[in-house]
Amino acid sequence: MRTFFEQLFRSQVWRSVFRHGLPESNRTRAEAIFFNFFLHVHPTKVRKRSVRFNYTWGLGGLSFGLFIILTVTGALLMLYYRPSAPQAYWDMKDLQFVVSSGQFLRNMHRWAAHAMVAVVFLHMLRVFYTGSYRPPKEFNWVIGVVLLVATILLSYTGYLLPWDQLAFWGISVGTNMARAMPFGIGEKISFLLLGGNIVGENALVRFYVLHCFILPVAAMVLMGIHFWRVRKDGGV
Amino acid sequence: MAEQTTNDPLKSETAVATSEKPPIPPKPAAAQISATPLPRKPKQDRAPDDDPGIWRMSRRSILSLAGWLAFFGFIATSTIGALRFMFPRVLFEPPTKFKAGFPQDYVVGEVSEKYKDEKRVWIVREKDGFYAVIAICTHLGCTPRWLPSDNKFKCPCHGSGFYKSAINFEGPAPRPLERAYIGLADDGEIEIDRSIKFLYEKGEWGKPGSFLEYKG
């Protein structure tokens, strides 16, 4: 077994992927971090205080984990869901009663979505109570607030997709709230969101595109910046 | 030898040239390498200092400006185009104008729910005539219910209540329900257009079209 690993570590394939030696010296240990795409954002030094679990409660990491779950289950649900008025509701019902593991995936998606809103909110509370929004991290707090809004919008746009009574009236109420804006801006925004004057086919497709592409991509870009800044400021 | 020269004049010429080599002329003095550089022509990348022009634009800065203008012009046009793209030109929504039968089909004092499911409109028959109430709650857009026993419209979402006249009296609704255009078509049927609205708070309930006078 030992010789197998020795051969593996010496093989050209292994050495082409990991272009540093085994982490046996300080130099190669550092290289193992610097030369890894996923680890390279880590700071050179981390304060012991910020590694302590009950300082961060791992809430940021949990939010990211939930986002991964939502991306994976969401991508799978997309295989059976058609965002059109005659089919959307029945595709959702098929996912529940016909598709293997469909009910499980849909519930995973639903509960992870609820949990993500809660965990992101708790993460925000933690950052507030530890004063982590103070200079030099004030801009990262701003990105975090935008990410909270993105999370809530993702949750809201997903609400319409089952195309049932709850979805229809939820979106009716929400877009009518937007209508309350003065000087005709509200009507314009509502029309833009729904792609019409009523919650119909256009609204369903718009919310689907927002939910499955625009908002997740925006959130991913912002998360990248958010994590990078956290690392550069000495967090984990 | 003589025959060959006539056949091939080039060869004979070269033969002559090699035989009678002229001496190499001495190079002109100007081409000689000297330590002092030649006077350089100024490049046109900026206006000359004595340029009297107001703008003093060089060719380079004009091209640069043109390039940036083209770039921002492109970005602005694309943004406007993308924004306009978001607002559909054609909507496939149900028509807002419809016919609702003959006036004598309605009973005095009744709130007809005949067209509520399909068109979201109540038709109210009073002693003097008709008015049409749009079944969209003015709070957040739910569909209220007509409760004949309580003689009121009641919204199931947040509890807003409206009198039969459509004026709000309880719950969070900030204003009365809207009335729609009601009139008689040429064939004597009632005609309703939901897209023409009459708002109580703007004093529009007295306007023509908000009430259909009918005694029968």
Image (cartoon, coloured by chain):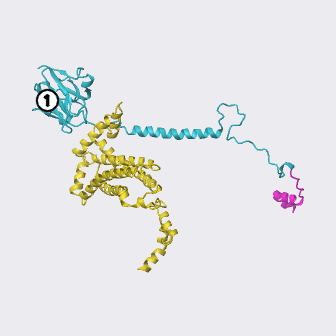
Chain colours: A yellow, B cyan
Question: Going by the image, does B21 lie left or right of B187?
Answer: right
Among the 4 quarters of the image, the one containing residue B12: bottom right
Is residue B24 found inside the magenta-colored segment of the image? yes
User: Which residue is identified by label 1?
Assistant: B111
What secondary structure prevails in the magenta region? helix
Q: Is residue A177 magenta?
A: no
> Which portion, as a residue range, is magenta?
B1-27
Task: Look at the image and tell me whether residue A53 can be seen.
Answer: yes
Q: Chain of mark 1?
A: B
| Residue A26 versus residue A147 in the image, above or below | below
Q: Position of residue A163 (x, y in %)?
A: 25, 46
Q: Position of residue A231 (x, y in %)?
A: 45, 57
Secondary structure, mark 1, is strand
Judge left or right: residue B60 versus residue B91.
right
The front one of B82 and A167 is A167
In the figure, A35 relative to A159: above or below?
below
How many discs mark residues in the rendered view? 1
> Does residue A226 lie above or below B77 as drawn?
below
- Quadrant housing residue A192: top left
| Image-quadrant location for residue B90 | top left
Q: Residue at x 29, y 36 (%)?
A: A197
Q: Is residue A80 visible?
A: no
- Amino acid type shown at disc 1: Val
Image height check: is B8 above or below B148? Answer: below
Residue A118 rendering spot, x and y as whole percentages: 30, 51
